[in-house]
Amino acid sequence: MFLLLLLCLAIAPGIAISVFVYWRDKFDKEPLYLLVKCFLLGLLSIIPAIIIELVSEKVFGVIVRTNGLNVAFHSFIIVGLSEEWSKYIFLCGFAYPKSDFNEPYDGITYSVMISMGFATLENLMYVVNGGFSVAIMRMFLSVPAHATFGMIMGYYVGLAKFRNNSFRLRLTGLVAAVFFHGAFDFCLLIDSTPIIILGAIVSLIIGIILSLKAIKHHSIISPFNPTVSSEIQDDSLLHF
Protein backbone atom coordinates (compact mmCIF):
# COMPACT_ATOMS: atom_id res chain seq x y z
CA MET A 1 0.00 0.00 0.00
CA PHE A 2 2.80 2.41 0.89
CA LEU A 3 4.61 1.58 -2.36
CA LEU A 4 1.43 2.34 -4.30
CA LEU A 5 1.21 5.73 -2.57
CA LEU A 6 4.82 6.48 -3.51
CA LEU A 7 4.16 5.54 -7.13
CA CYS A 8 1.12 7.83 -7.24
CA LEU A 9 3.12 10.69 -5.72
CA ALA A 10 5.87 10.12 -8.27
CA ILE A 11 3.57 10.04 -11.30
CA ALA A 12 0.93 12.62 -10.35
CA PRO A 13 2.99 15.85 -10.74
CA GLY A 14 4.02 15.12 -14.33
CA ILE A 15 0.48 14.18 -15.32
CA ALA A 16 -0.99 17.25 -13.61
CA ILE A 17 1.41 19.64 -15.34
CA SER A 18 0.79 17.96 -18.71
CA VAL A 19 -2.97 18.40 -18.25
CA PHE A 20 -2.48 22.07 -17.29
CA VAL A 21 -0.46 22.83 -20.43
CA TYR A 22 -2.99 20.97 -22.59
CA TRP A 23 -5.85 22.91 -20.94
CA ARG A 24 -4.12 26.24 -21.61
CA ASP A 25 -4.12 25.52 -25.36
CA LYS A 26 -7.29 27.49 -26.00
CA PHE A 27 -7.54 27.59 -29.78
CA ASP A 28 -6.24 24.41 -31.44
CA LYS A 29 -5.61 21.51 -29.10
CA GLU A 30 -3.14 18.85 -30.21
CA PRO A 31 -4.21 15.25 -30.92
CA LEU A 32 -4.06 13.18 -27.76
CA TYR A 33 -2.24 10.33 -29.50
CA LEU A 34 0.63 12.68 -30.40
CA LEU A 35 0.82 13.98 -26.85
CA VAL A 36 0.95 10.43 -25.48
CA LYS A 37 3.71 9.58 -27.97
CA CYS A 38 5.70 12.63 -26.87
CA PHE A 39 5.28 11.66 -23.22
CA LEU A 40 6.50 8.13 -23.99
CA LEU A 41 9.42 9.51 -25.99
CA GLY A 42 10.22 11.60 -22.94
CA LEU A 43 10.52 8.37 -20.98
CA LEU A 44 12.98 7.11 -23.60
CA SER A 45 14.93 10.36 -23.62
CA ILE A 46 16.31 9.55 -20.18
CA ILE A 47 18.40 6.73 -21.70
CA PRO A 48 20.92 8.86 -23.67
CA ALA A 49 21.10 11.29 -20.74
CA ILE A 50 22.01 8.51 -18.30
CA ILE A 51 24.61 7.09 -20.68
CA ILE A 52 26.24 10.50 -21.15
CA GLU A 53 26.23 11.19 -17.41
CA LEU A 54 27.74 7.79 -16.56
CA VAL A 55 30.49 8.18 -19.17
CA SER A 56 31.16 11.73 -17.98
CA GLU A 57 31.57 10.53 -14.39
CA LYS A 58 34.13 7.98 -15.57
CA VAL A 59 36.04 10.68 -17.46
CA PHE A 60 35.71 13.66 -15.11
CA GLY A 61 35.03 11.97 -11.78
CA VAL A 62 32.13 12.35 -9.36
CA ILE A 63 30.89 15.71 -8.15
CA VAL A 64 32.74 17.47 -5.32
CA ARG A 65 30.09 19.52 -3.55
CA THR A 66 32.58 21.78 -1.78
CA ASN A 67 34.16 22.85 -5.09
CA GLY A 68 32.06 25.53 -6.79
CA LEU A 69 33.67 25.14 -10.22
CA ASN A 70 33.28 21.37 -10.07
CA VAL A 71 29.62 21.70 -9.11
CA ALA A 72 29.04 24.25 -11.90
CA PHE A 73 30.64 21.99 -14.52
CA HIS A 74 28.62 19.02 -13.31
CA SER A 75 25.36 21.02 -13.14
CA PHE A 76 25.53 22.91 -16.42
CA ILE A 77 27.52 20.61 -18.70
CA ILE A 78 27.19 17.04 -17.48
CA VAL A 79 23.60 17.13 -16.20
CA GLY A 80 21.98 20.22 -17.73
CA LEU A 81 23.33 19.80 -21.26
CA SER A 82 22.95 16.02 -21.44
CA GLU A 83 19.36 16.00 -20.16
CA GLU A 84 18.08 18.98 -22.13
CA TRP A 85 19.83 17.83 -25.31
CA SER A 86 18.21 14.41 -24.89
CA LYS A 87 14.77 16.04 -24.71
CA TYR A 88 15.64 18.43 -27.54
CA ILE A 89 16.48 15.70 -30.06
CA PHE A 90 13.08 14.06 -29.54
CA LEU A 91 11.27 17.40 -29.68
CA CYS A 92 12.93 18.51 -32.92
CA GLY A 93 13.25 15.04 -34.42
CA PHE A 94 9.68 13.86 -33.78
CA ALA A 95 7.25 16.68 -32.92
CA TYR A 96 8.75 19.59 -34.87
CA PRO A 97 8.11 18.19 -38.40
CA LYS A 98 4.49 17.20 -37.67
CA SER A 99 1.75 18.98 -39.59
CA ASP A 100 -0.19 19.29 -36.32
CA PHE A 101 2.61 21.56 -35.08
CA ASN A 102 0.81 24.53 -36.61
CA GLU A 103 1.06 27.34 -34.04
CA PRO A 104 3.83 28.63 -31.75
CA TYR A 105 2.11 27.32 -28.60
CA ASP A 106 2.55 23.78 -29.92
CA GLY A 107 6.27 24.10 -29.21
CA ILE A 108 5.46 24.51 -25.53
CA THR A 109 2.91 21.70 -25.55
CA TYR A 110 5.13 19.06 -27.17
CA SER A 111 8.22 20.16 -25.25
CA VAL A 112 6.43 19.90 -21.91
CA MET A 113 5.02 16.47 -22.77
CA ILE A 114 8.52 15.19 -23.51
CA SER A 115 9.92 16.89 -20.40
CA MET A 116 7.20 15.43 -18.20
CA GLY A 117 7.85 11.95 -19.58
CA PHE A 118 11.52 12.40 -18.69
CA ALA A 119 10.76 13.89 -15.27
CA THR A 120 8.19 11.22 -14.39
CA LEU A 121 10.57 8.32 -15.01
CA GLU A 122 13.38 10.16 -13.21
CA ASN A 123 10.99 10.87 -10.36
CA LEU A 124 10.02 7.23 -10.07
CA MET A 125 13.65 6.20 -9.71
CA TYR A 126 14.37 8.78 -7.03
CA VAL A 127 11.12 8.26 -5.09
CA VAL A 128 11.33 4.46 -4.96
CA ASN A 129 14.83 4.77 -3.47
CA GLY A 130 14.26 7.88 -1.35
CA GLY A 131 10.77 7.41 0.05
CA PHE A 132 8.00 9.80 1.05
CA SER A 133 10.09 12.87 1.87
CA VAL A 134 11.83 12.72 -1.51
CA ALA A 135 8.46 12.35 -3.24
CA ILE A 136 7.11 15.49 -1.58
CA MET A 137 10.26 17.54 -2.23
CA ARG A 138 10.43 16.57 -5.89
CA MET A 139 6.70 17.18 -6.35
CA PHE A 140 7.15 20.84 -5.50
CA LEU A 141 10.70 21.40 -6.82
CA SER A 142 12.23 19.05 -9.37
CA VAL A 143 9.20 18.13 -11.50
CA PRO A 144 7.93 21.74 -11.83
CA ALA A 145 11.51 22.76 -12.61
CA HIS A 146 11.66 20.26 -15.48
CA ALA A 147 8.37 21.71 -16.72
CA THR A 148 9.81 25.23 -16.78
CA PHE A 149 12.87 24.02 -18.69
CA GLY A 150 10.51 22.43 -21.21
CA MET A 151 8.34 25.53 -21.53
CA ILE A 152 11.32 27.80 -22.09
CA MET A 153 12.78 25.47 -24.71
CA GLY A 154 9.36 25.00 -26.31
CA TYR A 155 8.79 28.75 -26.47
CA TYR A 156 11.78 29.23 -28.77
CA VAL A 157 11.17 26.04 -30.75
CA GLY A 158 7.59 27.22 -31.27
CA LEU A 159 8.88 30.51 -32.66
CA ALA A 160 11.44 28.69 -34.81
CA LYS A 161 8.74 26.75 -36.65
CA PHE A 162 7.33 29.98 -38.07
CA ARG A 163 10.40 32.19 -38.43
CA ASN A 164 13.19 32.34 -40.99
CA ASN A 165 16.03 32.10 -38.46
CA SER A 166 14.75 28.76 -37.18
CA PHE A 167 18.10 27.18 -36.30
CA ARG A 168 19.18 30.14 -34.17
CA LEU A 169 15.88 30.12 -32.30
CA ARG A 170 16.00 26.37 -31.71
CA LEU A 171 19.56 26.69 -30.45
CA THR A 172 18.49 29.57 -28.21
CA GLY A 173 15.79 27.33 -26.73
CA LEU A 174 18.28 24.58 -26.00
CA VAL A 175 20.83 26.95 -24.46
CA ALA A 176 18.17 28.69 -22.34
CA ALA A 177 16.86 25.35 -21.03
CA VAL A 178 20.40 24.18 -20.23
CA PHE A 179 21.12 27.45 -18.42
CA PHE A 180 18.03 27.27 -16.19
CA HIS A 181 18.53 23.55 -15.59
CA GLY A 182 22.17 24.10 -14.66
CA ALA A 183 21.36 27.00 -12.35
CA PHE A 184 18.68 24.98 -10.56
CA ASP A 185 20.93 21.94 -10.13
CA PHE A 186 23.86 24.09 -9.01
CA CYS A 187 21.75 25.50 -6.18
CA LEU A 188 20.70 21.99 -5.12
CA LEU A 189 24.14 20.39 -5.33
CA ILE A 190 26.46 23.02 -3.84
CA ASP A 191 27.53 22.43 -0.24
CA SER A 192 25.73 25.47 1.15
CA THR A 193 22.39 25.22 2.92
CA PRO A 194 21.28 28.84 2.22
CA ILE A 195 21.98 28.42 -1.50
CA ILE A 196 20.27 25.04 -1.56
CA ILE A 197 17.11 26.43 0.05
CA LEU A 198 16.91 29.98 -1.31
CA GLY A 199 18.76 29.55 -4.61
CA ALA A 200 16.74 26.58 -5.82
CA ILE A 201 13.44 28.21 -4.86
CA VAL A 202 14.35 31.55 -6.45
CA SER A 203 15.54 29.92 -9.67
CA LEU A 204 12.34 27.88 -9.81
CA ILE A 205 10.18 30.96 -9.25
CA ILE A 206 11.98 32.81 -12.04
CA GLY A 207 11.49 29.81 -14.32
CA ILE A 208 7.76 29.67 -13.49
CA ILE A 209 7.31 33.39 -14.15
CA LEU A 210 9.03 33.14 -17.53
CA SER A 211 7.08 29.98 -18.38
CA LEU A 212 3.72 31.59 -17.64
CA LYS A 213 4.77 34.59 -19.69
CA ALA A 214 5.72 32.27 -22.56
CA ILE A 215 2.33 30.52 -22.38
CA LYS A 216 0.49 33.84 -22.40
CA HIS A 217 2.55 35.22 -25.28
CA HIS A 218 2.09 32.18 -27.51
CA SER A 219 -1.64 32.11 -26.76
CA ILE A 220 -1.92 35.75 -27.82
CA ILE A 221 -0.03 35.32 -31.09
CA SER A 222 -1.76 32.08 -32.10
CA PRO A 223 -2.97 32.24 -35.71
CA PHE A 224 -6.16 30.62 -34.41
CA ASN A 225 -6.81 33.47 -31.97
CA PRO A 226 -9.72 35.42 -33.52
CA THR A 227 -9.16 38.51 -31.35
CA VAL A 228 -5.64 39.35 -32.55
CA SER A 229 -4.74 40.73 -35.96
CA SER A 230 -1.93 39.21 -38.01
CA GLU A 231 0.04 42.46 -37.69
CA ILE A 232 0.00 42.28 -33.90
CA GLN A 233 0.87 38.59 -34.04
CA ASP A 234 3.94 39.22 -36.18
CA ASP A 235 5.17 42.10 -34.05
CA SER A 236 4.61 40.20 -30.81
CA LEU A 237 7.01 37.50 -31.90
CA LEU A 238 9.86 39.88 -31.14
CA HIS A 239 9.07 40.20 -27.45
CA PHE A 240 9.46 37.79 -24.55
Image: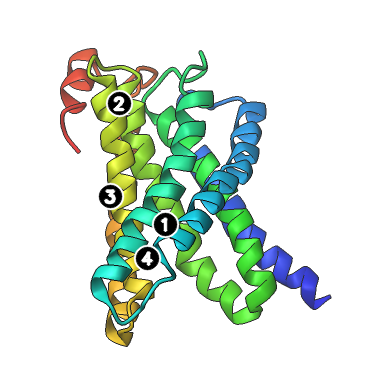
Q: Is label 3 in contact with label 1 (beta carbons under 8 Å)?
A: no
Q: Secondary structure at mark 2?
A: helix
Q: Secondary structure at mark 4?
A: helix
What is the distance, in whole Å, between disc 1 and disc 4 at their CAs? 8 Å
Query: Foreground mark, 4 or 3?
Result: 4
Can residue 41 be seen in the rendering of this structure?
Answer: yes
Q: Residue at 60% across / 47% down in the picture?
A: 47
- Residue type for callout 4: Asp
Kindly identify which residue carries mark 1.
79
What is the distance, in whole Å, between disc 3 and disc 2 at their CAs? 15 Å
What is the distance, in whole Å, between disc 1 and disc 2 at their CAs? 26 Å
- Tell me the tag on residue 210: 3
Q: Secondary structure at mark 3?
A: helix
Q: Is label 1 in contact with label 4 (beta carbons under 8 Å)?
A: yes
Query: Foreground mark, 1 or 2?
Result: 1
- Tell me the tag on residue 159: 2
- Tell me the tag on residue 185: 4
Mark 2, Cα crowd under 10 Å, few <14 / some 14-19 / many 20+, is: many
Up the image or down, 199 lies above or below 213; here it is: below
Earlier sequence position, callout 1 versus callout 2: 1
Q: Position of residue 195 (x, y in %)?
A: 28, 79
Q: Position of residue 44 (x, y in %)?
A: 62, 42
- Residue type for callout 1: Val
Q: Secondary structure at mark 1?
A: helix
| Left or right: where 5 falls relative to 165 | right
What is the distance, in whole Å, between disc 4 and disc 3 at their CAs? 18 Å
Q: Position of residue 151 (x, y in %)?
A: 39, 43
Query: Foreground mark, 3 or 1?
Result: 1
What is the distance, in whole Å, between disc 4 and disc 2 at their CAs? 27 Å
Q: Quadrant of the C terminus?
A: top left
Q: Residue at 28% across / 52% down in the picture?
A: 179
